[in-house]
Amino acid sequence: MEYEHTSNPVLQERAFEAMPVSTAFMSISGCVNKTAICLGLVFLSAAFAWKTSYASIEELMGKTMLFGILAFIVALFGIFKPHLAKVTAPLYSLFEGLVLGSISLLFERSYPGIVLQAIALTFGVFVAMLVVYKTQLIRVNEKFAIGLFAATVGIMLVYMANLLFHLLTGHGFGFLGSSSPFSIGFSLFVVAVAALNLVLDFDFIVRQSRRGAPRELEWYAAFGLMVTLVWLYVEILRLLSKLHSRR
């Protein structure tokens, strides 16, 4: 049974249907190449942010917030203007790389070696989910999509409530930042949901390529995959930091 929506805010049917008819069609290899380019841009800008000298932690956090706002603006523009993905996807990757480089530096200063572990685990999970999808260990169907969508939305609502609570009271939900067994369990759950979203993304891209989506949407597909990969990396970094703090 086919399903219409994914948990990814980028990879939605409306974006693919809004594109004009084209004689050049989207391919899996094209999506892989565009994703590789975006990953390369993320690594380049992350390395730049990592090597940049900061006068204080406050300056580092301030620039991280600025980069994050820019990445968010580009992401929103990319979601609503899918035909411009050739521009927005690389720009998003560059800004998000600056964010990840800055965040990673903060975590590395507290827990040396954690960033390399997070990168290795992120790509390990990516490959594992690709194998899971290719071997059909998980059947992607309507029930799977709806369940994953509900879990993803639930997590986002918890994060939004935590942000609102922090703005109102000056501190967020304690369990999100602590290293308690419950907090670690919650992070494991979030990492699992983020990982499973990759399976949904893979399936969505494959189905669109089979339908003959325009080649221009290869960049948009790469953009969607980057959104999930960034989320997965950040959640793995948070999980590892909680585990490190218990040592």
Image (cartoon, rainbow, N blue to C red):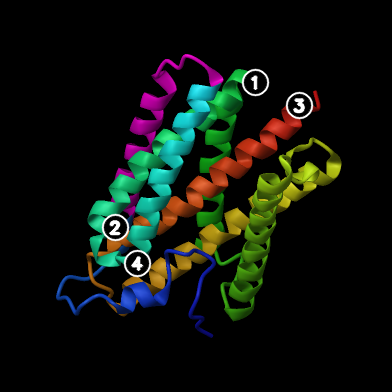
Which mark, by number, is residue 219?
2
**Mark 2–mark 4 distance (CA, rounded to whole Å):** 14 Å
Name which of mark 1 and mark 2 comes first in the sequence.
1
The answer to which image quadrant residue 40 occupies is: top left
Range drawn in magenta: 32-57
Dot 4: within a 10 Å radius of its alpha carbon, few (fewer than 14), some, or many (20 or more) residues?
few
Q: Position of residue 195 (x, y in %)?
A: 59, 54
**Mark 1–mark 4 distance (CA, rounded to whole Å):** 38 Å
Q: Amino acid at mark 2?
A: Trp
Quarter of the image containing the C terminus? top right
* Element under disc 3: helix
Dot 1: within a 10 Å radius of its alpha carbon, few (fewer than 14), some, or many (20 or more) residues?
few
Q: Nearer the viewer, mark 1 or mark 2?
A: 1
Which mark, by number, is residue 110?
1
Quarter of the image containing the N terminus? bottom right
Residue 34 among magenta residues:
yes
Q: Amino acid at mark 1?
A: Ser
Seen as rendered, the residue at the extreme bottom is: 1
Name which of mark 3 and mark 2 comes first in the sequence.
2
